[in-house]
Amino acid sequence: MTDTSILPVHRQRQAFVYIRQSSPSQVERNTESTRRQYALAARAEALGWHPDHITIVDADLGLSGESVDKRDGFNSLAADVALGRAGLVLGLEVSRLARNNADWYRLIDLCALTDTLIADFDGIYDPACFNDRLVLGLKGTISEAELHTLKVRLLEGIRNKAARGEFRCTLPVGFVWGERDGEIRFHPDEEVVRAIRTVFERFAELGSMRRVWLWFRDEGLQFPVRLRNGDDVRWIPPAYSSIVQVLHNPVYAGAYAFGKSRQERYLDEHGRMKKRLRQLPQAEWRVLLPGHHRGYIDWETFEANRARIGANRRPRPHSAGGSVREGSALLQGLAICGNCGRPLRTHYLGRHSSPNYHCPGRHIVEGRATYCLQIGGTQVDRAVAASVLEAVRTGGTEAALKAIEQVESERDAALSQRRLAVERAVYEATRAERAYRAVDPENRRVARGLEREWEQRLEDLERERAELALRERERPREVSANEREALLALGEDLPRAWDAPTTTARDRKELLRALLEEVVLDAPRNEPQARIRLVWQGGLSSELTIERPRNRPATVRTDEDTINLLRRLAAHYPDAVIAGILNRQGHRTARGLRFTQSRVASLRTHWKIPCFQPSQEPPDGELVSVRQAARELGVVPSTIHRMLNDGFLAGDQITPGAPWRIRLTEELRQRFVEHAPEGYVPMQIATARLGVSRQTVLAWIKCGKLDAVTIRQGRRGGLRIKLPANGSPSLFDESAVSNLP
């Protein structure tokens, strides 16, 4: 189409110049293509657009045109076209605007609706015109096909090269590419190689990725990581993911692997096309070439490590396995139900956490609330342990020698890593010194930075040397000849080593797993004996028979005094209050524990004692607590307690230590007043007029010889006593009353 298609209405709107390169490397290297795209702004001026009406859209430089995902520049361009702001869209070619027909046709439709022209290197097109639209559609299809062809050519070339083990993909830390095609060599840094070997050595000993990671952390060692897109190595404290990657990567076993993942497309919650990377199982890898190069371990060891890691995972229902844990149940992860073949689960009972095994198979399949099998684990563990120790009795001396070698090798491995770290720190400090001395002294800006770098490297060197010296001082001394003989003697007496306090449950479980594949338990409920079948590593089996553990009758019970007291208290108080009363009086449960609300409720239920039921309609003169009485009478609780102790108030306690209960009556309320009635005097005046002591007056009030009231408020609150009209009463004889003065 010619320039005659451009109308004044088009020039009144904006001309958008869209610029894109597919990758950052193209932006950096293919500068001529970028320059040609920016030159399209001059072409827009030549077509009649004012420079102020020309907009350059270059936000998508370095992004692929395969989709509009993350292409903000293209999305903003499409929005401007849809709003009628664009008169012309310029691109070097269709492939710059889109490599996807869906995106390309969407832009064409928007341009046709808003009367927007599209221009490329070949000419100017009107999407509203059928012929121009046909040409644009063909160009978009060719652009998409071109991308597909380029991808296929590149991928097939990569796959053919990878099938021979020659494609140079990124290698894990510890390996570098050699000079020949497909040659993979160990890293030239001895410290890097030693760190990788230590991971496999510690895993062979400890059997758990997490325990290997914790060993590195406890020893304070650093671990190498490869910097992105390079062979340089950086040393950092080890992360758990680093240990996992080393143990899972087949390259460390001498295998070349390619195509371990696959890119998938999916729609997100907003309906946008997304991509994700999915890791494939080993059976679906495109290329796997064992024996391709020298590895840190062989392929058989790698497969054994994978199986061991898989067994360490938390087992799913109906599957055995799981890593060794700290519980005392020795057959955890090994025990199998003899009835249904499911793995037995472990639980602990009693004050001493005795191990027990049970199989919930019947509950799972038949929906019953019973176990398929349940048996105490103490006798079972003892029988299995005795069998295993008897089987390995002849190899005790050899095991002791290997234990000595293992302790010494573990100690030497940590010190070797420390010495290599010191060598690395010496090299870094020397290199920083050379860089500082090579700089021009007049260039102080560079010299200051290099000087700080040199000082930092020297500090790192001193820190590594101090850590090495500390580790060497803390290093246990060598095993003496006498200690070696003692260990060999202990190897001949494996039961003593098995029962030693220093031997943990984890150590015992590791030994059992090294010798046994599984232990099948068959313990019918109605039979007095239980049968145990030991399946040894290699396929051999043996059988044991033990007496089935019996439940012992209960020999302890709560004493009768506590039960009788509970019967009396339950009629008046809830369980929580009863627990407090029993604890204050020193009562304990049959197991010697303090009472709690749940324990009181359990004991009451066992002896069929009814619980406390509060009255729905309280009688006249209801019984209330001290706090409620104080609130009703307008005093503080301490005043109520003092009057109870002095005998001025009548209270009730079911048993010593129980809460006080006060009968709140109208007569009692009248004894607490705001102001003293006429004829009532304070205690000081009463003692003076009666000519007796204060204790005598209080005794006369308690026995009813004198009337008294309590003033609730004011600074002169307290007792007010009513004096008799004719004389003072006698505490013992009413006739012996003297006249008042």
Image (spheres, helix red, strand yellow):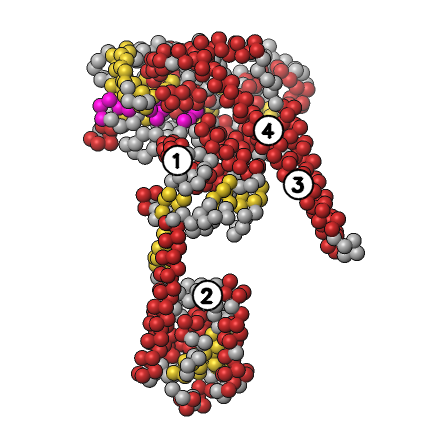
> Which of the 4 quarters of the picture holds residue 69?
bottom left
How far apart in space, not on screen, are marks 1 and 4 (Cα)? 29 Å
How far apart in space, not on screen, are marks 2 and 1 (Cα)? 41 Å
Residue with the mark numbered 2: 22
Q: Is residue 35 shown above or below 346?
A: below
Residue with the mark numbered 3: 427
Disc 2 and disc 1 in contact, CB within 8 angstroms: no
Mark 4, mark 3: which one is toward the viewer? 3
Residue with the mark numbered 1: 299
- Determine crowd level at label 1: few under 14, some 14-19, many 20+ residues with C-alpha closer than 10 A: some
Q: Earlier in the sequence, mark 2 or mark 4?
A: 2
Which residue is located at x 34 percent, y 33 percent? Answer: 315
List x then y, in percent, for residue 361: 24, 28
Element on which disc 1 rests: helix
Q: What is the number of the mark on residue 415?
A: 4
Q: Earlier in the sequence, mark 1 or mark 4?
A: 1
Q: Earlier in the sequence, mark 3 or mark 1?
A: 1
Element on which disc 4 rests: helix
Residue at the outermost right position? 442
